[in-house]
Image (cartoon, rainbow, N blue to C red):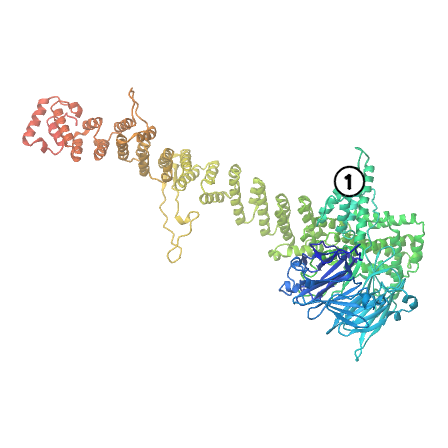
Amino acid sequence: MNIHIFEPVDQVLCLCAGVSAPPGGVKLPDSAGGFSYEESGTLLSITSNRFIHWSTSGDTVQLVEQSLDTNLLNNAIRLKFLHCSVLPGGVHIHETLNNVIILIVTNLSVHRLVLPHPTRMYRSELVTELQMQSVFTDVGKLSIQDEAHSFILPQSPAASAAWISPNGHAHFALAPPTGGVTVVTLPPHDQQGSVSLLELKQSSVMQRLAGWMPSAIRGEQSPCDLAVSLAAWSLEDDTFIFALCQDHKLRVWSFKLQCVLVADLLDYVPVGRAELRCVPGQAHRLRVCFSGSTGLCVCVYLAIPKRGQFCVLQLMASDNGRYSLENISTQFSTQETLVDFALTSTDIWGLWVDDDNQTVVKYINFEHNTAGMWNQVFVQPPPEEEIHIGLDQDPRETYLDVLFSPLRFTAEAIVKALQIYKRGTERFVDVPWDALKKEVTLAVENELQSSVTEFEFSQEDYRMLQVEFWSKFYACCLQYQEALSTPLALHINQATAMVCLLKKGFVSFLLPCFAVDHLYLSSDLFLCVSPPMFVWSDSDLSRDVLQMVQCLRMVSDCVQGEMACEMEKALELLLSPERAAEQVLENMLANDSENVIEDITNKLQDVRNPLAAMGALLRELDLETDMETGPETTAPLSQLYGSTVAVSVVCQAVCQVALTRALLCRDLLILQHLYLRLGDNMLLAGSAQSLQLQQDLIPRCSHLLCCYYLLKQLSQTLASPVPLDTLWPSNPGFLFPECMMGNCQYTQLQEYVRLIGPWCQANVGSCRFILGQAYLASGEGQKALQCFQEAAPEVEKEEFLNRLTGSEEEAGTTAPRLLYYNKVLRLLEDVGLPELVIQLATLAISEAVNDERSLAALWTRIFKHHLDLGHNREAYEALTQNPDASRQLDCLRQLVVVLCERAQLQDLVQFPYVNLHEEVVSIIESRARAVDLMTHNYYELLYAFHINRHNYRKAGTVMFEYGMRLGREVRTLRGLQKQVNCFLAALNCLRLIRPEYAWIVQPSPGPASDRPGTSPKRTHDGELAAAPVSRQIEILELQDLEKEYILSRCRLTLAQQHPPSAAIAGSASAAEMVALLVQAGLFDTALSLCQTFKLPLTPVFEGLTFKCIKLQYGGEQSQNEAWNWLAANQLPSLITTKECSATDEAWRLLASYLEKHQSQNAQYYRCVINRLLSHGVPVPDWLVNAYKKVDAAALLRLYLNYDQLESAAELVLEYVDALLGKGHQYFGIEVSSYARMQSLLNTELKARPLWALRSGQELQQIVSSGRPAIRL
């Protein structure tokens, strides 16, 4: 069988041979050839399974390097020789240790192309990469037009041969039109030198340095010795040149010893020699081969009309240096036109074209085949000229299926047809297969639409138009495919037994054929001459099988067109193959105009034991009975046949085998039903064998037909090479579906399961599982879940499902079905189907009743996905069902966190949490203390949680702790606002309970190492430091919370008035806050805070006094700024028509504070006056008048302390006058008898002067001692 491979060209190079275009031009036939590396048969070497093939057409040579093991990059080039035509067979490739050398002969020139050897491009001796660079990668960088690599010929040669000498010279053996052989020698590519010519003639040997002497001058023209085919072979230190001349003689030349042998080949022709001598042998061919057993052999093809002849001759050397030829074998070929042939050490391979222009390939063993019977090679037939379209088939889809089938058309043929169909408006280069299919569809449909002139027509008319336009495009593809399929040459690699058929547009690989396929495909003549003894040792059985196969071929000839389509359709629609075979047989009987059924019946009479013959055929067809495990190997075979080319070859081979065997099974099934119809007359044992046929053979044949139809469908979509037995549906290993699943071929996988569903009973559960995966990939989750559930009962019965669950770590303790459910649950989770995970996990719970570990895992899964879906109630219920306390706690923690993040606090608070109340509180508390206060609201959640359960003390504690942390950690305006709200909420909570229970425990901030985000403290030795001793518990009552609330309000007021202060106000104490408030000018708030915490008001008065001083001596800017803090205080109201300044308002505010906040001994007056005097500021009169009325003696002392003597003296004089009754009301003195006072004072002053009194109080005591009613 042959497989097609097409390779696009990567590089195009134009070469100028240095000649002008000849008049009229020369058109030479197209040719092709191949070259295999010496180590191509060495496993995993750089050149393993690697070869180069080429084709010539006119002035162009296309070279392609292929590898079956690795993908080669930049592996195709096209050389164009201007004004020249490449000689047929004029491309010769040789390899040296370091280079691959290509020698090319045109009709006017010779050329040499030196490329690096693959082993020099890669250092490693083994293939370890999936792709490699070809030897043609850098061909564009070579100086291939250098004179040292080419030479111009004065005349066109008729044939050529070439070789590389051990010293690196390139030799071209050419057949000039004057006869003989001329050898052109180019110097080594890495050395300087000149081109030399050596002319070999039988009469003489003449060597010239350049040019050829015209034949008219030499006078030795001998057209009869014109060589029509040349070959060269190097042996030791000499090279032999074999020239097959048109006079039917073989001349052998030694490059050193000139002509060594002339043999008349007509001596080997049995009859008609005289007639042949008169006819020039222009179509003779010559091939040379060397083997260790036979030495150097020459195979000559003599193109004798109607009876071509192959002569295999062995070159023999005698002791005296003479050579002779010994005829080893003579084989005849009586039909077709020879295109090419190849010689191996044992076989002759021939390539012909028959009268119908169809390719014919045959081979024969020339050593042991005495009968002269050529072996058939079954070449893939050309595509059908007409496509049958059923009434229920869409013409477009039918034609597309045929066009893009892997065994029918190449991409190049379709592209050429598409370009013609689109009238050359577009050019398509390297179009992917799927994209090309779309382009074809679009082109044909556009052509159809443009031809429609009516707006409305029937569906049948539209169908006819579709058939017309698609058939037109199909016919165009047929023409180009036929042109590209023109055979040119054979290439055989003896090291790997690879045989390639080189065609004009692609390469076909010839593969070995199975015995049963060979029987079915062979002609009747071959079956008669060569009976199939190689299959069955029993001669009677072999004879019966032979007769039955001939009957099958007769059935096959009848089942064509609509009958074949009906059978194909039945298999595709999963109808009964047996019923379809009965219908086809009925159709054959009804339309048997040529008595074919009678001929088949007569042929069946010769089958002695039909059931045994059928059984033998079925055993050969059943791959399940032929699965033998080969010897294990440790060689790294991952790269063997790993290239894209090899994958395509294997896939097409499998498709061709499946197609052939499907037809055989179809014909055998029809023949079996014919046996049933004929009845017992055709069977040996009557009803017993009829029963065996119905119950055993027909079901087996029907099963095999379905199997091979399945293989045919699958092989058209394979993505990697797969052994044929691996594809078998009944294979217990289930490797092929697993391979498709691994390569993500889900569409093909669904089709596979669909096709085997009705009849294959192997791996049922595995099929359902992979079908479920295919449904998952296509987004059909419910279908996938159903398939997974259907596969569960087969878990412990099938190898694939056992392997699927056997990799689990808990396989020893967990039930296999639970492991299977876990595997499926992970698949569903991977594709994001939580609803299906919940459904399957709920189903799996019934299997895990006694497995607490699995039960906990399943309930955890159900909880997780319910929570992800927002099913909060269901998630809570799943949480409560979990038997594992640790998992339950984890789920509870996740529930709290997720609902908080979603702001679904209502659900979180209202869940009953039976037996989980403390855990919930602990989780929320730990989360509240571990996360950012301004981002998450766990404290508020916990507050709502306690309020919902009427636990007000806990709620108050939570909010108080929240407020404390806000003060420490969130020192912003927003944080202070929340702190005020927290303390207010805590106050409200305590006010809702009875007074005796209205207390909370002071929350402890804990050590620094216990706070979130801090590392544990260690000693200098690295050991963990000892935990600090716990502090005494502090109880906070309602009054304490009220104080904290007022303090927080003050902080907030400060931050609102002066935002930068928020950073330090958050954790400031009451005394510190007073200072901050005074500094910000919030004196009302500071006074309120002092009164709440029973702090002295002195800092407030001192601060206000200082601000008054600054205002009094400040500029306009300070006046403007003062209004901001003045507005924040409650200024005393004053009705006046005079405009007041900020300084006036500040003094008025101070006066109002002094009047409002009276103190013992007037200490606030004293501190104000003291601050004024300390800054050297005169005391205002209103302040002096107010203070001297309260404590004149203290005012006098202040004057004296600050050296205000004048003011002190004036005060004393005023005070004395007051004692004497003048202005006594300014000092608060009330006296009814001035005389008495004056007497007492005079008495005292006599004793000591006034200035000797120690204090004003002492003076008052003197005055008041005489009158107790005096109020000081």
Would you say 800 lies left or right of 1007 here? right
Q: Name which quarter of the figure residue 1108 lies in.
A: top left
Look at the picture and state if 1070 lies above or below 595: above
Residue 1104 location (% of width, % of height):
28, 32
Query: Where is mark 1, residue-wise?
Result: 447
Q: Which residue extends farthest top? A: 1137
Q: Is residue 559 left or right of residue 509?
A: right
Q: Secondary structure at mark 1?
A: helix
Q: Nearer the viewer, residue 916 or 256?
A: 256
Q: Is residue 1079 left or right of residue 609?
A: left
- Say above or below: 1086 vs 111: above
Q: Quadrant of the rendered structure where residue 288 is?
A: bottom right
The answer to whether any part of residue 55 appears in the image is yes
Q: Residue 800, how many percent across, how many down? A: 68, 55
Q: Count of labels shown?
A: 1
Q: Position of residue 895 (x, y in %)?
A: 53, 43
Q: Quadrant of the N terminus?
A: bottom right
Q: Is residue 1080 above or below residue 491?
A: above
Q: Nearer the viewer, residue 1124 or 843?
A: 1124
Q: Splitting the image into 4 quarters, where does residue 513 fall?
A: bottom right
Q: Quadrant of the C terminus?
A: top left
- Amino acid carrying label 1: it is Glu
How crowded pointer 1 is (Cα within 10 Å; few <14, some 14-19, many 20+) is rated as: some
Q: Is residue 6 left or right of residue 1072?
A: right
Please state which of residues 521 and 1045 is positioned toward the viewer in this rendering.
521
Tell me residue 296's x, y (percent).
Answer: 78, 72
Instruction: State whether residue 650 appears in this view.
Output: no
